Image (spheres, grey):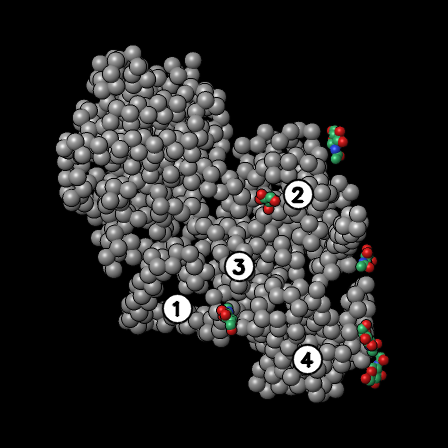
């Protein structure tokens, strides 16, 4: 009995606690100081304590306390904080004991006024905390400013240091140190236009650049559980057809993981949306433009909440930062379980490089039934660089660089001779930097942050990428050097898009250089898609992006060099050594892993759309990697140009359901992969017009394998003696499932992978038992492993290369396409 009542009391108090938490966040560490003030000041319903209350935490408590009776400050809610200040004549430290380690929020309030001989507008100083530089050479002419930072505190103490510049002084009007809820800042987030996630965000300091509430309404700090100020979005909006909505009452935190601490209901309850009510066929983006500091990476948080309750059904839209995808075909309904008012947010990290502008856009996705896009809130936070600084490392140096540049121009105008010398020096500089970057690329892929700081100042590059990262951008000169000025001798493949060259960088790194031919809209689109895809995804079984170049109207993509060329070239119509069954299985497993990763590796499934044996490349160990992401995007209708390229490149691989219904799903890749499996098994082309009727189409022919008697009748004659029956059957069955007419009947890539692994197990077991029985059949593939693959003779392709592209073939395709449609 006693136990029961104790439990009752406990659960009641637990409930009570929950209610407490629900009614607002109570920070465990909560230092609020009205610096320079003799009195406690209440701001909203918080009290900033008088300066002397905490002066024992200060290393130099004898600093000057200043006050003003200036009436220039409009009476904002925190205006009392600005009436007094503490002035530091020398470096001074606040040391705050911290109860709860973890991320803390630090706000510094500044307002310059004149106090006796001190004109605070003249103050110039730095502020650092732990080993983060928060402010450097900071000076404020006029107006009040709140600077907001957050970083992790590990050893139960925070040291905040104010350091005046020489012959100057520092000041602060108020400061605030509060602990933050743990869920607020993630440890990692995906990177826009870069591979992978950025890890270890916890060890970086963040500075709030902006908090924006969409819907043309600002949110007052009093209305936010963490006293954050949200400004209205209208002054950032680049006008287009927008409308605003407000439905704060609809917002509910009941169903998701979003709490009021992430953003208050007033943020989620208002939104700016595409004005699709007025024009149901509207096709436009809504764009907001922000000013940021170049050379830093930013954590950008998007807040969404469907408060519209549209009866039109599901909609998707794209989210862009600097014209790059931040989220492709964002499906708000799905992510919020179709609950009206259920908030959702996601984070991305962007690198800002040399541009001071950041554009954020939302716009309809081609997948959507009707055009609709909505955004409720946005936060932009600057991430400290690898030196732990939130300020440009050396403002003097960067300004002297621009001076040097203008001098170069001046001198070049005056004297040709000096100009040549300078060009030489510049070239040297470029080469050195390229080397550095190459080293960085090969050694520390994960730390993109370091790489980005070697900001390129390539002024004649295309506007297309001017806002994007430079980490992977190569100067044209370097590529020309690597490919011997695009020498014909180094061509390892050609296709509709142009040529692929083998390139060797100065340090010996071999690369494949794909050079786009014409700058058509389509080419440009595929170029961008490819870079975006490759840089978003990094996997052992996906071909790696090394860099790109868009200088002087070029469209060049640099990939890792794949010594052994395409899978296709190893299967038929070449004199390359024959692959053993086990090797073929391993290649299929490798490519299945790559595709599985594409389909499931991120929240948004990526459909490759051009899976074929010519797009599976083999490295020097015959490890398979999936290549060519030029078509990988989601989109229901294939536009005209797409049909023609797709039919030319990969007709035999096209999912019949996709052809007829034009509805793209991952299952279309499964179908194409099934075709690749058949090719691998049968060692022949997908469409071979030289064969007798009935045999021309591999899929049609092979699918009748059960009628044909023993499986040996169907497979590549090279495999007959070495492949185990069990493994062959298993393989054929998976291929058959993949090739099911109806997408729903096809297995997922994960199932395919699992089954392929078991086919390999069956083969390995068989080989072991035959070895024991003294029967060795594997001599051929063991031998091939030792055969050095002559790079010069290996035909290598990265794009949709000479794949059944003959003119006479197009008629067959057209005919077959029609047949398939029926
Ligand atoms: C300010 O508030 C603190 C805490 O509530 C209190 O201890 C202190 O006496 C107050 N100081 C003044 C000057 O009122
Ligand atoms: C603080 O003030 C706001 C608005 O004035 C009010 O909604 C909120 O409940 C108050 N919070 C506390 C803890 O008193
Ligand atoms: C402001 O304060 C100064 C003393 O600090 C005083 O001389 C002056 O008259 C005050 N001005 C106003 C407008 O109250
Ligand atoms: C204080 O300094 C600012 C900027 O240097 C200047 O514009 C202003 O006139 C100064 N005010 C006084 C009272 O000297
Ligand atoms: C935002 O509101 C202001 C007035 O409150 C109005 O003048 C302005 O046009 C609005 N902007 C938009 C984009 O609706
Ligand atoms: C919400 O929480 C569930 C489990 O608690 C988790 O699986 C899911 O990823 C979370 N969603 C977000 C958006 O964090
Ligand atoms: C959404 O609209 C439907 C009818 O269109 C209505 O029945 C439902 O109550 C609305 N939901 C909310 C949360 O407003
Ligand atoms: C929206 O912006 C993206 C990225 O800049 C662009 O690719 C797309 O074409 C734009 N859509 C419209 C309708 O302008
Ligand atoms: C800051 O200092 C601590 C120990 O003094 C160290 O572990 C940490 O790595 C440093 N952080 C940075 C960004 O330098």
- Tag 3 secondary structure: helix
- Which one is earlier in the sequence, the residue at label 4 or at label 1? 4
- Which one is earlier in the sequence, the residue at label 3 or at label 1? 3
Q: Mark on residue 201?
A: 3
Instruction: Please give the residue where the numbered disc 4 appears in the rendered image.
Output: 57
- Which one is earlier in the sequence, the residue at label 4 or at label 2? 4
Task: From the viewer's perspective, tell me whether residue 5 is left or right of residue 777.
Answer: right
The residues tagged by marks 4 and 1 sit, at their Cα atoms, a distance apart of 54 Å
Q: Position of residue 144 (x, y in %)?
A: 71, 69
Q: Are marks 3 and 2 in contact (CB under 8 Å)?
A: no
Give me the residue at 19% from left, 24% from top. 720
Tell me the quarter of the image containing the C terminus.
top left
Looking at the image, is mark 2 or mark 1 nearer the viewer?
A: 2
Looking at the image, is mark 3 or mark 1 nearer the viewer?
A: 3
Task: From the viewer's perspective, tell me whether residue 196 is left or right of residue 73.
Answer: left
Q: Position of residue 393 (x, y in %)?
A: 49, 71
- Tag 4 secondary structure: helix
Looking at the image, is mark 4 or mark 1 nearer the viewer?
A: 4
- Tag 2 secondary structure: loop
Instruction: Please give the residue where the numbered disc 2 appears in the rendered image.
Output: 256
Instruction: Please give the residue where the numbered disc 1 appears in the rendered image.
Output: 409
Give me the residue at 44% from left, 71% from top. 401
The residues tagged by marks 4 and 3 sit, at their Cα atoms, a distance apart of 29 Å
Asked if the beta carbon under badge 2 is closer than 8 A to the nearest atom of ligand 6, the reply is yes
Label 1 crowding class (10 Å Cα cut-off): few <14, some 14-19, many 20+?
A: few
Q: Position of residue 753 (x, y in %)?
A: 38, 34
The residues tagged by marks 3 and 2 sit, at their Cα atoms, a distance apart of 23 Å
Q: Position of residue 116 (x, y in %)?
A: 74, 86
- Which one is earlier in the sequence, the residue at label 4 or at label 3? 4
Nearest to the observer: residue 621 or residue 669: 621
- Which one is earlier in the sequence, the residue at label 2 or at label 1? 2
């Amino acid at each position: 009995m006693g136990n029961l009542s104790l439990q009752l009391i406990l659960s009641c108090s637990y409930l009570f606690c929950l209610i407490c938490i629900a009614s607002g966040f109570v920070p465990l560490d909560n230092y609020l100081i009205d610096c320079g003030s003799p009195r406690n000041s209440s701001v909203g319903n918080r009290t900033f304590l008088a300066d002397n209350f905490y002066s024992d935490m200060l290393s130099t408590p004898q600093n000057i306390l200043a006050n003003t009776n200036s009436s220039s400050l409009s009476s904002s809610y925190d205006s009392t904080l600005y009436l007094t200040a503490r002035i530091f004549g020398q470096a001074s430290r606040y040391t705050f004991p911290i109860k709860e380690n973890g991320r803390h929020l630090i706000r510094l309030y500044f307002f310059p006024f004149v106090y006796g001989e001190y004109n605070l507008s003249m103050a110039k100083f730095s502020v650092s905390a732990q080993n983060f530089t928060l402010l450097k050479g900071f000076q404020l002419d006029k107006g009040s400013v709140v600077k907001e930072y957050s970083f992790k505190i590990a050893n139960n103490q925070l040291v905040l240091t104010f350091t005046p510049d020489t012959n100057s002084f520092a000041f602060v009007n108020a400061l605030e140190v509060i602990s933050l809820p743990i869920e607020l800042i993630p440890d990692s987030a995906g990177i826009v236009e870069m591979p992978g996630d950025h890890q270890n965000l916890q060890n970086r300091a963040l500075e709030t650049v902006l908090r924006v509430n969409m819907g043309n309404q600002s949110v007052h700090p009093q209305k936010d559980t963490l006293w954050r100020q949200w400004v209205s979005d209208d002054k950032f909006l680049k006008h287009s057809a927008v409308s605003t909505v407000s439905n704060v009452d609809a917002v509910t935190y009941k169903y998701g993981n979003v709490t009021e601490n992430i953003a208050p209901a007033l943020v989620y309850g208002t939104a700016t949306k595409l004005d699709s009510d007025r024009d149901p066929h509207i096709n436009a983006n809504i764009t907001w433009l922000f000013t940021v500091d170049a050379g830093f990476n930013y954590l950008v948080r998007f807040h969404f909440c469907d408060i519209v309750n549209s009866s039109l059904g599901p909609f998707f839209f794209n989210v862009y930062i600097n014209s790059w995808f931040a989220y492709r075909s964002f499906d708000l309904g799905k992510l919020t379980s179709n609950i009206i008012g259920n908030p959702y947010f996601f984070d991305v990290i962007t690198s800002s490089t040399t541009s001071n502008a950041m554009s954020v856009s939302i716009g309809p996705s081609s997948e959507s039934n009707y055009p609709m896009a909505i955004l409720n809130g946005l936060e932009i936070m600057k991430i400290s660089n690898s030196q732990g600084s939130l300020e440009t490392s050396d403002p003097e140096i960067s300004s002297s660089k621009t001076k040097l540049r203008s001098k170069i121009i001046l001198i070049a105008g005056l004297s040709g001779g000096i100009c040549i010398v300078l060009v030489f020096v510049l070239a040297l500089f470029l080469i050195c930097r390229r080397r550095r970057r190459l080293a960085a690329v090969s050694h520390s892929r994960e730390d993109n942050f370091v790489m980005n700081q070697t900001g390129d100042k390539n002024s004649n590059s295309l506007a297309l990428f001017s806002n994007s990262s430079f980490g992977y951008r190569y100067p044209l000169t370097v590529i020309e050097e690597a490919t011997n000025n695009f020498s014909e001798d180094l061509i390892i493949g050609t296709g509709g898009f142009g040529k692929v060259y083998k390139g060797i960088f100065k340090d010996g790194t071999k690369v494949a250089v794909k050079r786009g031919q014409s700058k058509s809209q389509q080419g440009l689109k595929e170029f961008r898609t490819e870079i975006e895809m490759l840089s978003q995804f990094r996997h052992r079984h996906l071909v790696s992006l090394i860099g790109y170049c868009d200088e002087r109207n070029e469209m060049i993509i640099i990939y890792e060099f794949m010594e052994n060329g395409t899978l296709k070239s190893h299967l038929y119509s070449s004199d390359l050594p024959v692959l053993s069954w086990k090797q073929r299985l391993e290649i299929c497993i490798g490519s299945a892993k790559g595709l599985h990763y594409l389909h499931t590796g991120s929240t948004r499934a990526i459909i490759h759309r051009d899976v074929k044996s010519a797009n599976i490349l083999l490295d020097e160990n015959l490890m398979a990697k999936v290549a060519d992401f030029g078509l990988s995007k989601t989109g229901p209708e294939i536009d005209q140009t797409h049909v023609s390229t797709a039919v030319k490149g990969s007709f035999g691989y096209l999912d019949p359901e996709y052809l007829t219904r034009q509805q793209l799903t991952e299952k279309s890749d499964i179908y194409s992969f099934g075709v690749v499996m058949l090719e691998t098994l049968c060692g022949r082309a997908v469409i071979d017009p030289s064969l007798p009727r009935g045999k021309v189409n591999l899929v049609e022919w092979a699918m009748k394998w059960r009628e044909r008697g023993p499986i040996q009748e169907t497979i590549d004659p090279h495999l007959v003696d070495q492949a185990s029956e069990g493994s062959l059957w298993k393989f054929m069955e998976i291929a058959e499932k993949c090739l099911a007419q109806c997408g729903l009947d096809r297995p997922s890539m994960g199932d395919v992978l699992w089954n392929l692994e078991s086919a390999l197990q069956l083969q390995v077991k068989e080989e072991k038992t035959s070895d024991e029985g003294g029967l060795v059949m594997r001599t051929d593939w063991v031998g091939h492993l030792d055969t050095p693959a002559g790079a010069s003779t290996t035909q290598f392709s990265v794009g949709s290369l000479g794949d059944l592209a003959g003119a006479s073939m197009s008629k067959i395709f057209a005919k077959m396409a029609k047949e398939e449609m029926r």
